[in-house]
Each structure stands twice: as structure tokens, then as C-alpha cells.
Amino acid sequence: MQNAADENWQVLLSLFPADWAEEAVGTGAVERLRGFSSPEALLRTLLLHVARGYSLRETAVQAKLADWADVSDVALLKRLRNSELWLRTMCADLLRENGVRMQNIPAVKRMRIVDGTIVKEPGKTGSQWRVLYSLQLPDLACDFFQISPAEGAGNGESFTRLPVRKGDLILGDAAYCSAGGIRSVCQSGGDVLVRVNPSTFVAYSVQGRRLGLLTRLRGLSEAGLIGDWPVQIRDSSACLAGRLCAIRKSEQAIQAAHRRIELNAIRKKRKTKPHTWEYAKYVVVFTTETAAPAEEILEWYRLRWQIELAFKRLKSLAQLGHLPKHDQHSSRAWLYGKLLVALLTRKLIRTARDISPWGYLFPPSSKPLA
């Protein structure tokens, strides 16, 4: 008879991509099962390390107690490294299942999503680390991964820390919307597409006059209307040309945004400024890409927004745990493992309403007994 933990695992296993076991072999994660009873046991052990935040040594002990594996922490680290492509492939499969479609990515561009998170290792003396990473679309290949102390000069989230080459289109959230960071990308031959932070963003018209952003946005009086304005931004050493692209949200989306603002104000016990309610009615981005129409620019940013839903869960999952700092392979595999758990969580929430009263989904091969 299965215990509750095994039954819960079967429910979770039903959410994985259908060919996850075949991908384990095809990607080289399972060349030999030395120390593990099956590919399923390997997957379960890796998720124990990634999702629960156990150290490699703790994970090896727990896996042995559960009769999943009999391996050392060193052997488990090697397995984690070898599973990098496997975990990434499953992440890409789940993104497609979640409805993220990336057919319109321009062939001449290398589109990259940049993000970061803080990891606090367990214990009273646990260190805090800032993880900065870049994922390419559409295959989610991690082309940059950097670990630094959470505090200190030069350790924040910024485009200046990112290696850039000609043809890159870097997508970032509002935290990356600074003139200095944008300039660093442009000087290396890349372009940016960032969400505007209205409280800090300053733009100028092509004539050099300061732009009244809210005045322009109020001209988008109906849901779905799009604005596209050439602008300049400045820092201490340069003036950069770009565009502001904006779209007015639907009334339902506006109401949801206002509810979030209200709850945030209650939680932080502060009064919301009037213009905050106004800005919440729009999605506004700044880009140095000049050729694509505004609709396409906004669609590209929407790709980031869809993946951002998973990133938000990734950040909460990453807050506490043992971060492999041994090498780039193990670090990237850890990142893909965290992202995989985040995407599985999203799929579980999406499909929860369809789980039948008996508490699980039928696997594809299920057949009634004669």
C-alpha cells in the first residue's frame, strides 16, 4: 500500500512532461543508474535538494533513508551537473504547456531575459548571495550566471554586470531601468527592452524638453490602445535615443492592479500617491530597438511577463537553500531545478480545478481492469 508521500509524488509526477524519462536518457542525465534505483528516483532526489533547500550531504542521507539512492554528496553533485540539460529541457517543455509561444522572436536578435534573486543559506550564520542570470529565448539556455555577496558596491541588479555582444536584445524588469545600465548595453552593440519605473524614469522629447509621461498615457483612453513616442534618456556622460511603447490595460486588469496596490499600502501602512493609481492602468516599456512596430515590442515584453510569473515563484523558492558554488555547471543546474519547481507549481495551480474527487489524474496509459 502506498503511503501519502508516495501518492502525492504520483500526483506531482503526472504534471511532468510526458517524455521526461526519455529525456533523462537522451540528455545524458542517466547514462548509468549507479547508486539510484531508477530515473524517477534520481529526479525525486534532485528535487529534494532543490525544492527543500537541503545541502547535498543532507539530501544524500534523506535519499538513502527513503531507499531512493545510496550515493555520497560528491556523487550527487556530479549527478546534478550532468542533469543540467535534462532540467532545462523539462523547463522549456513546461513553458510551452503553460501557453508561452515564442514564434515571433527575430532571427537577427539574440533575445535574453535578465533577472536576479537573493539566496539566504540556512542557519544563524548563513550567508546571503545575489544570483544574477540571463536566459536566452526560446530554449531557456542560461548564458550567464554570476554569484556575488548580496550587499556591497557593484553587487546590485544592473545591466552593467552583464556581458553583451552585438545583436543582443536584453529584456529586464523595472529594476534594470537606469540610464547607466542601458548605456552599457548600447555601447557593446546590444539593445534593451525594459519596463519603465515611473517614479525614477526621466525622458526627454527629441527637441530636448522633459516629457510629461502621464500626460501622454492619458491619451490612451480605451483598453488596447497603443502609444509609441520617440524619446531620449540621459545620464552623466551620454544622451541615448529610444522609444516609449505603452498599452492601456483592460478594465479587469486595472482593477486587479489597483487591488494589489491597495493591499500593499495596507501591509506597509502607507498612503498611496494619486499618480500611482494612474500608472497602474498601463504597461509602459522603454526600448532602443527602432525597427520593430510597437505591437511587436509589447509582444516581446509580454513573453518576459509570462515567464516572470514563474520567476516570482522561483525567487520565493530560492530565498532559503544551499546554493552550489562549486562551478558553473552545478550552479546552472540548481537554477533550472528551481525554475522547474516554479513551473510545476504554476501548472498544479492551473490544473487543480480539474483534479477529480479521488485526488489524482489518470496517467496517459491507464486502462480499466477487465
Image: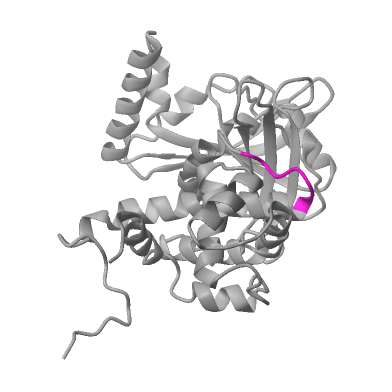
Q: Residue at x 46, y 54 (%)?
A: 343
30 or 159: nearer the viewer = 30
Q: Residue at x 76, y 23 (%)?
A: 235
Residue 333: x percent and y percent?
Answer: 66, 55
Which quadrant of the figure contains the N terminus? Answer: bottom left
260 or 165: nearer the viewer = 260
Residue 48: x percent and y percent?
Answer: 52, 51
- In magenta stretch: residue 41: no
Relative to 140, residue 297 above or below: above
In this rendering, does residue 228 appear at all? no
In the displayed structure image, the side of residue 228 where residue 168 appears, left or right:
right
In this rendering, does residue 183 appear at all? yes
**Rendering quarter of residue 263:** top left
211 or 115: nearer the viewer = 115
From this viewpoint, which residue is outermost toward the top?
A: 270
Relative to 312, residue 358 above or below: below
Q: What span is colored magenta in the figure?
A: 322-328
Q: Residue at x 47, y 28 (%)?
A: 216
Residue 338: x percent and y percent?
Answer: 55, 49
257 or 64: nearer the viewer = 64
Which quadrant of the figure contains the C terminus? Answer: bottom left
From this viewpoint, which residue is outermost toward the bottom?
A: 370
- In magenta stretch: residue 327: yes
